[in-house]
Amino acid sequence: MSAPDASIADAPAVRPEPWRGLAWLAARECLRVSKLWTQTMLAPVVSSILFILVFGLSLGSRIREVSGFEYDVFIVPGLIAMAMAQAAYSNNSSSIFQARSDRYIDDVLAAPMHPWQINLGLTIGGAFRALLIGIALGALAIPLTGAPIERPLALGAAALLLVALFGALGVIVGIYAETFDHHTFINNIVILPLTFVGGVFYSVEILPSPWEQLSHANPLFYVVNAVRYGFLGSSDASVWLSFAVTTAIAAAMVAWSQYLFSTGRRLKP
Amino acid sequence: MTGSAPALSIRGLTKRYDDGTRALDSLDLEVPAGEFFGLLGPNGAGKTTLINAVCNLLRITDGEIDVFGCPASSLEARRTVGLAEQDTNLDRFLTVREALLYHGGYYGITRRHSAERAEEMIDVFDLRAKADVRAPKLSGGMRRRLLLARALLHEPRLVILDEPTAGVDIELRRELWRYIRMLHSRGTTILLTTHYLEEAEALCEEIALITGGEIVARSTPEGLKQQFGARTLEDVYLKAVHEPREKAA
């Protein structure tokens, strides 16, 4: 162990630079995604493309048009939305759970950053992963199926709301989870089923009563419809209602995650 | 942040955990800037709770903490504190070099300066051979070195070392002592907790004994011996900490 080159005590007082801290924390989360790329990127892209190939291209020819679209085109927006939602959620919940479990989150919590910057930095990893998956799936699925992008601005807004909603949900679950099972439980028992019955594979208009009405009580139905509107220019529900519901849920999730960071509840004893 | 302010000023610090356990009870403590200060006490005395409160890792129940004259929760105060925790809480996804680089980033250091400091710390703590190895693949001694390197990377004015030599071999312990002394000689304030009394006696200018969340004695090592009529620091520790606990039991 050799001597330090300069006197630490004599070093000039350095002002905190919380924005730089935020950038590094976001970079760390993105680095984690890229280091685990087979798990974080390849697996979800391959499984979603398999859905499109099996359900869309193989079985799709036996199914008549849905809401005026070929079946393989119809399912693309929902499948992309589902993959992005799961990616944003899983990334943040597992990253934060591991950081809490190994306690290296202390290095971040002790650093000179505002609580909202820590929250945002940790959320960006899920957004990065989800957006990359969405772009990769779009690049593969659009040439395969001929799915259009009718409303690119609406699609961009829907994608941002989706990653904010599920990214924040991942942060919340990552903070509350006591075991890794809790993280997978929410994904398998809540997100996946609600997305499936939210109209990924079918139009809820074809469902008999009361299932059609019940589908409208599913918040993920509106998320799927907001993304579908961006792609196809039409959706099962009013586009304004879809965006309003998605925005409201995203805002509630972001507010909840911010509350946890601002108060330190569950993060600090 | 004033130059004459104490490195650490704690007034009426109380921490009651959610299960009702009172870990700290109206604790007052002041550590002058530039001092090598030891905090001794049995397991569960409140040492780590106190450290976590200073480092923004705890929701305190009551009291005030200032670091160099700034509230401990402020960004200015947090920028000046370096913490090496008792547990080796290293980021499992980062290599040694990345762990140091990213830590510097979290503390607002520029990429260039952080990279320079990381290389410097890698050399200082003999981590060069393992610079590209992830933390989970390091030996216990190497992890301990990395923890200390990380705590010092952003050039903190107050370094808090929570049992830094627990579980390390004698050779590394001596090396760490030498390095910590060197830091202190250059003006860095050191707050050290340890269970090794000879370590505290060899290193610390002042020692506080804590038990049951309260400071029960505080002085220089020699002052404590005189105060308790003891020949060794171990005798002081037994008289100040263990005997009252046995009587209370």
Image: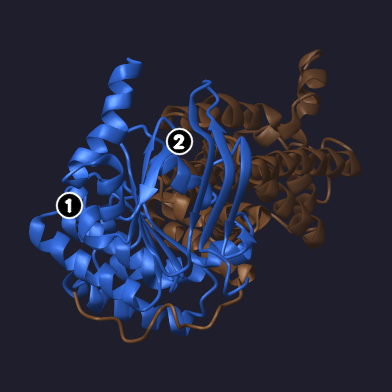
Chain colours: A brown, B blue
- Residue B51 placement (x, y as % from top left): 45, 48
The residue identified by callout 1 is: B198
**Residue B96 or residue A29, whichever sits in front:** B96
Element under label 1? helix
Residue B46 horizontal/vertical position (percent): 41, 37
Measured as percent of width and height from the top left, residue A84 is found at: 60, 48
Picture disc at residue B214: 2
Circle 2 chain: B
The residue at the point 27 percent across, 57 percent down is B135
Of B182 and A183, which appears nearest the observer? B182
Identify whether B11 is placed above or below B153: above
- Three-letter amino acid code at the position of disc 2: Glu
- Mark 2 vs mark 1: which is more N-terminal? 1
Label 2 with label 1: CB-CB less than 8 Å? no
Q: Residue at x 30, y 81 (%)?
A: A4
Quarter of the image for the N terminus of chain A: give it. Answer: bottom left
What amino acid is at disc 1? Glu
Q: Is residue B81 visible?
A: yes
Q: Left or right: A253 with respect to B176?
A: right
Chain letter, disc 1 residue: B
| Label 1 crowd (10 A; few <14 / some 14-19 / many >=20) | few
